[in-house]
Image (cartoon, helix red, strand yellow):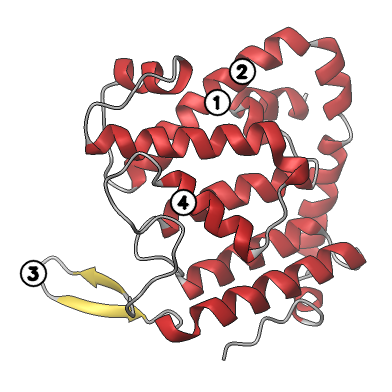
C-alpha cells in the first residue's frame, strides 16, 4: 500500500524559490477582497465567462468537443444534452456548479468524491459513475511509430478504496493542523489522486474539479473569475 506522507514530505518542498513564490501568491491573495468589493458586478460577469471556458477547456483535454455556441448554451442556459459528447459536458457543468455554490460544505472525503464522480456521469448511459475502477488501469504513451509502452501503473483496483481512504485522511489531517501551506498540500493531494487513478474513466476531469474545490476551500478565488482577476491582482 502506498504511503501518503503529509507530515514530513511537505517540509522538503520548502526550497527558497518555492517559499518566495508562496509569499508572492499570498501577497496577491491579500488584495482579493479589495477587488471583490470594488468590482463585484464585473467579477460576477467574469465568473460566468470562466465557467464556460473552464468547462470547455477541461473537456477538450479529454478529446470531448462541441461548438462554442453549444458549449455556451449547455453551460449558461443548462440546455439538455443532445449526444454523448454533450452528456459529458453537461455532467461536468453540473459538478462545477455544485463546487461554485457549495464548496464550503464539500469535504474531500472518499464518499464525497464518489458523489461528484456520479454527478459527472449523471447524463451518460453508463453505470461507471460513482464507482471505483473494477479493473487495473495504466498510463501509456504511443510514439511516432505507433509503438505503445506503459509509462505508469496506478494503484491496483483491489487496493483503490483503501488508498482513497488513506489519502483523504492524511490530507485532511494535515490541512486541519495548518502546519504547512495549503498551496503545497493541494498539488500533493492531486498528484496522489492521479497516482491512484481511482476510476475507470474521468480521472483527469475529476482531478481538475478537485483542484478547483480545494483552492476555493483555501480562499483562492482565481478559478471563479478566470485570467482577468489574475491580471488585476498583479497591479
Residue where numbered disc 1 is placed:
50
Which image quarter is the N terminus in?
bottom right
Q: Earlier in the sequence, mark 1 or mark 3?
A: 1
Confirm or deny contact between disc 3 and disc 4 (CB under 8 A): no
Q: Identify residue for label 3.
A: 145
Labels 3 and 2: the sequence-earlier one: 2
Q: In this rendering, which labeled residue sits more in front, label 1 or label 4?
A: 4
Residue 183 is marked as none
> Residue 14 in the image: x percent, y percent?
80, 69
Q: Which residue is mark 4?
A: 118
Q: Is residue 176 left or right of residue 229?
A: right
The residue under the point 38% across, 16% down is 73
What is the CA distance from the residue labelled 1 to the residue labelled 2?
6 Å
Instruction: State the separation of the CA atoms marked 3 and 2.
Output: 44 Å
Query: Mark 2 highlights which residue?
Result: 46
Q: Residue furthest top?
A: 41
Circle 2: element type: helix
> Contact, CB < 8 Å: mark 4 with mark 2?
no
Foreground of the two, 233 or 49: 49
Residue 227: percent from left, percent from top:
60, 28
Helix, strand or loop status at disc 3: loop
Q: Nearer the viewer, residue 230 or 162?
A: 162
Amino acid at each position: 500500500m502506498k504511503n501518503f506522507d503529509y507530515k514530513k514530505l511537505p517540509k522538503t518542498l520548502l526550497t527558497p524559490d518555492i517559499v518566495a513564490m508562496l509569499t508572492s501568491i499570498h501577497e496577491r491573495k491579500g488584495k482579493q477582497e479589495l477587488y471583490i468589493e470594488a468590482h463585484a458586478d464585473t467579477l460576477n460577469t467574469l465568473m460566468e465567462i470562466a465557467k464556460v471556458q473552464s468547462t470547455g477547456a477541461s473537456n477538450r483535454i479529454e478529446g470531448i468537443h462541441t461548438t462554442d455556441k453549444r458549449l455556451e448554451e449547455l453551460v449558461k442556459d443548462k440546455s439538455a444534452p443532445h449526444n454523448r459528447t454533450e452528456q459529458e459536458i453537461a455532467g461536468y457543468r453540473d459538478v462545477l456548479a455544485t463546487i461554485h455554490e457549495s464548496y464550503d460544505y464539500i469535504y474531500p472525503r472518499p464518499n464525497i468524491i464518489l458523489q461528484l464522480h456520479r454527478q459527472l456521469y449523471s447524463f451518460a448511459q453508463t453505470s461507471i459513475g460513482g464507482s471505483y475502477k473494477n479493473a487495473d488501469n495504466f498510463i501509456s504513451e504511443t510514439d511516432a511509430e505507433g509503438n505503445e509502452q506503459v509509462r505508469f501503473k496506478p494503484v491496483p483496483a483491489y487496493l483503490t478504496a483503501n488508498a482513497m481512504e488513506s489519502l483523504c485522511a492524511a490530507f485532511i489531517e494535515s490541512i486541519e493542523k495548518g502546519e504547512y501551506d495549503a498551496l503545497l498540500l493541494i498539488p500533493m493531494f492531486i498528484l496522489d489522486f492521479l497516482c491512484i487513478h481511482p476510476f475507470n474513466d474521468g480521472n483527469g476531469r475529476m482531478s481538475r474539479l478537485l483542484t478547483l474545490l480545494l483552492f476555493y476551500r483555501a480562499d483562492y478565488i482565481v478559478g471563479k473569475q478566470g485570467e482577468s482577476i489574475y491580471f488585476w491582482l498583479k497591479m
